[in-house]
Image (cartoon, grey):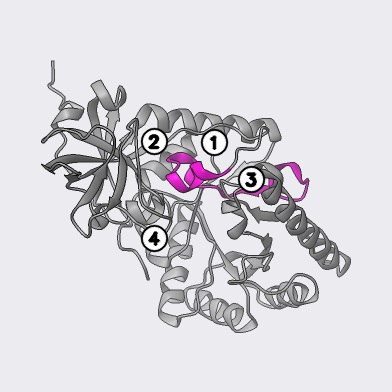
Amino acid sequence: MTWQPSVHDIDTPALVVDLDAMERNIATMAAFARSHQIAWRPHAKMHKSAELALLLVQAGAVGACVQKTSEAEALVAGGVTDLYISNEVISLSKLERVAHMARALEAKNGQISIAVDSVEGIRRLAAALDKVHASMRVFVEIDVGQNRCGVQPGAPALALAQEVLRHPQLHFAGLQAYHGKAQHLRSAAARAEAIQHVVQAVRSTRALIEAAGIPVPLVTGAGTGTFIHEAASGVYGELQPGSFLFMDADYATNERDPAAPVFEHALFVKTQVISVCATHAVCDAGHKSHAIDSGLPRMWNSTLAYGNGGDEHGILRGPVLPALGDTLWLVPGHCDPTVNLYDQLVGVRGGLQHGVVERLIRVDARGALT
């Protein structure tokens, strides 16, 4: 019998995936998509792993979303063949890389798609593709409340769709409509109201484009906090949630909508107590071990509170302090940038208390920012 390391053998700090919880999350999302007869394309910017992207495809996902050209390259190198860059790429050097990926994937019966929000961006993309004799699907991104990228709904989106059609290398695939801020509105009612406005903007924009004689094959978007509303809208044909796979402390703060599926925490930072005094204890997982943009991590199954101890330390306070050498588990505030801090995820089977290390999951796109 081959010996497997126990969860207790994992050195600290380490980023650990509860494989059982993760797989239950995947099964829950897959069942939701089937029951609503809607496609799902999970965002790989969260896990940055070709292995996990392929696992999601095996469960029924149509492919993966990424935000960066280098993320796409890392996943293509890992065997992912259907990718969507749900972000604008303007740099000529990056567009050349995108074009080469498009050509390579076409040869494998795969595809890569991209979002645009400017005439200049469309023309640059078309020129890059023309150089390598490749083509791509293009989504026009509309700003539905994020106030980040995207053109305004309505006539500006129609103008871009018309521009896409002027270039034979480009295929107008539909609309990108994602409201990121709505994902973290705490009340279920506030999230539902926000997406109601999104759906109205998408529906009117789609109607305007179709009235001009241009089919709109697909509307894509949505996140873990709101996807139930996009799925129910009758407008969206594809969902992009990614954080459901691991679930972080920030999403756990949201009031749950009774209609929403339940997902479990599956991503944890294992840490160890390295110092104890009368007032507090100190663990070895500081800011270099987890992102803090969405707040400090929360303790898992513990009455202790985690406090800021700097780069390498966490300050633990509570009614009963842990002993020197004790192991503790943290739920990161934001999973995406936390994953980006690690070269690998430690996949544990059988739970955090008595499980064994089943496999190491490479974070292929760690640091893939270009």
Q: Which residue is mark 3?
A: 227
Q: Which residues are magenta?
A: 230-254
* Front residue of this view, candidates 158 and 341: 341
Q: Quadrant of residue 156?
A: bottom right
Disc 1 to disc 4, C-alpha distance: 21 Å
Residue at (66, 60) in percent of width and height: 177
- Depth check, mark 4 against mark 2: the one in front is 2
Under tag 4, what secondary structure? helix
Q: Considering the numbered disc 3 on the image, is that residue within a helix, a strand or a loop?
A: helix
Mark 1 / mark 2, whichever is N-terminal: 1
Quadrant where the image shows the N terminus = top left
Q: Which residue is mark 2?
A: 266
Q: Does the magenta-highlighted stretch encompass residue 235?
A: yes
**Residue 121 seen in render:** yes
Could you tell me which residue is drawn at 30 percent across and 46 percent down? 306
Q: Residue 281, how many percent across, how many down?
A: 18, 43
Amino acid at circle 4? Glu
Q: Which residue is mark 1?
A: 60
Chain-order first, disc 1 or disc 3: 1
Which of the two labelled residues, at mark 1 and mark 4, occupies the earlier sequence position?
Answer: 1
**Element type at mark 2:** loop
Name the mark on residue 71.
4
**Foreground of the two, 112 or 292:** 292
Question: Residue most toward the bottom?
Answer: 120
Q: Is residue 6 above or below residue 269?
A: above
- Residue 77 shows in this picture: no
* Number of the front mark, 4 or 3: 3
Give the vertical position of 36 relative to 88 (above or below).
Answer: above
Q: Nearer the viewer, mark 1 or mark 3?
A: 3
